[in-house]
Image: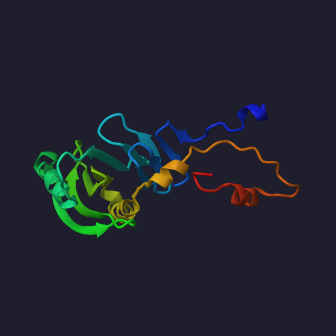
Amino acid sequence: YLREIEGLIVGYHNGAEMAVRDRYYNKEAQVSLGIPAGWQVHLEAEGALVSMSRADREFLLLASDPMHLAIDAAGIEAEFEKGLRRRGWTKVGGEPALTAQGVPLRFSYYTGATAKGEPIHVGCAFIANQKRRWTLTMLGGEKEAGEVMPRFRQTALGIRFLTGQELTVLQPPRLRLVRAPHGADWPALAAEHLGDPGE
């Protein structure tokens, strides 16, 4: 039985996408995004590349489309804001920034209401990179207002666009059987054997 299960793919993986520890990876879109602590990852059939949620109170969505015409982050932001009135959102702030990789992005912050009339806070990050348009959106209710934007900024600034070498070594996690030495404890074994996603 142990020989049969060794090498079995484990965890969240569907061929193109995987979640390893605290990061989401998409090999086809060549992007990686941090998963906030305590959040769940969901595949989206329509509208978003991936979504994450925390206790149905906060939501994070990453969407991407091919760039047919050259446009920068500010241009993506301007196009998005043409539909603000339809969404019922009001812009309350915005600023430029750079990701950890040095990719320019535009932060924009909005307030609005759900279909039930409940107040929401929305953060959007707009990025133009790799001939694609990227929009990262986080939504949270009134109770989460003080937590939503700092968490959103941290997540957005940590987005990574994967290089050829990273894509080559990126593999889904597999079950490995290890004979534990006498007297070993779980923390020591975990520290020794749990490495990077490519291992």
Screen quadrant of the N terminus: top right
Could you tell whether 24 is left or right of 88 in the image?
A: right
Count of numbered labels shown in the rendering: 0
Between residues 151 and 195, which one lies in front from this camera angle?
195
Please say whether residue 4 is visible from this viewpoint.
Answer: yes
- Locate residue 177: give its quadrant: top right
Q: Residue at x 24, y 46 (%)?
A: 114
Q: Quadrant of residue 92?
A: bottom left
Q: Is residue 88 left or right of residue 181?
A: left
Query: x, y percentage for residue 104?
Result: 28, 65
Name the residue furthest right: 182
- Give the residue displayed 52% in from the left and 55% down from the top: 22
List x then y, in percent, for residue 73. 22, 59
Going 45% across and 52% down the picture, which residue do you hit?
A: 164
Residue 7 point in image, percent of width and height: 68, 38
**Percent position of residue 167, x then y:** 48, 49
Q: Is residue 191 above or below residue 175?
A: below
The answer to whether residue 39 is seen in the rendering is no
Q: Residue at x 50, y 36 (%)?
A: 15
What color scheme is it?
rainbow
